[in-house]
Image (tube, rainbow, N blue to C red):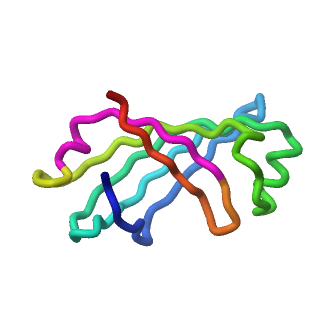
Amino acid sequence: MLNGRIIPGGSDWPLIRQDGASQISARYTIIADDGAPIYVRNDGLRVSSPEILTRLRAGEAVDPADYYFRSTPCFEAPVGPHGWLNQTIFIASLGRTEAGVLISVYRVT
C-alpha cells in the first residue's frame, strides 16, 4: 500500500542490554513514489544467541528464523493519499540481508 525509497540522513541507535538483546530506535524518511515525504519512527527489539549476533555484526546473511527481530513503525505523513498512515498501528518483521535490513510492515486491523 506504500511504495517509495528511504532517503539518506536517517539514523538508528541500538542499545545493547545486559541480557544481550538489542533495543533498536530508528528515524528516517521515505519519499513515496508520488514525491510525498513520510517520516518514520521505528522502535523494536532484536534477540539472538551470541553466535547469531556475531554473524549479524559481521554482515553475514542469517536466516530470519534464527533470531527475533520485530518493531513498531509509526508514520507521519502529509494529509492526502498517505494520511491513512497517521491513523493506523503497524508491526514489522525485520531481517538482515547482505544489502542491508529488509523490513516487512503489517497493518494491524
Observer-nearest of 61 and 25? 61
Q: Is residue 8 left or right of residue 89?
A: right
Q: In the image as oriented, which residue stretches furthest toward the right?
A: 51
Q: Is residue 23 left or right of residue 72?
A: right
At horizontal 43% and vertical 68% (from top left) the residue drawn is: 9
Q: Is residue 16 left or right of residue 6?
A: right
Q: In this view, does 52 lie to the left or right of 15?
A: right
What x and y, as percent, mark residue 56? Answer: 76, 54
Q: In the image as oriented, which residue stretches furthest toward the left?
A: 80
At horizontal 64% and vertical 68% (from top left) the residue drawn is: 99
At horizontal 63% and vertical 41% (from top left) the residue drawn is: 15
Observer-nearest of 38 and 21? 38
> Magenta stretch containing residue 94, yes or no?
yes
In the rendered structure, which segment of residues is drawn in magenta? 83-95
Question: Image height check: is 94 above or below 88?
Answer: below
At horizontal 77% and vertical 53% (from top left) the residue drawn is: 62
> Magenta stretch containing residue 58, yes or no?
no
What x and y, as percent, mark residue 109? Answer: 32, 27
Observer-nearest of 53 and 82? 82
Picture quarter containing residue 81? bottom left
Question: Image height check: is 73 above or below 108?
Answer: below
| Figure disc tally | 0
What x and y, as percent, mark residue 24? Answer: 57, 43
What x and y, as percent, mark residue 93? Answer: 55, 42
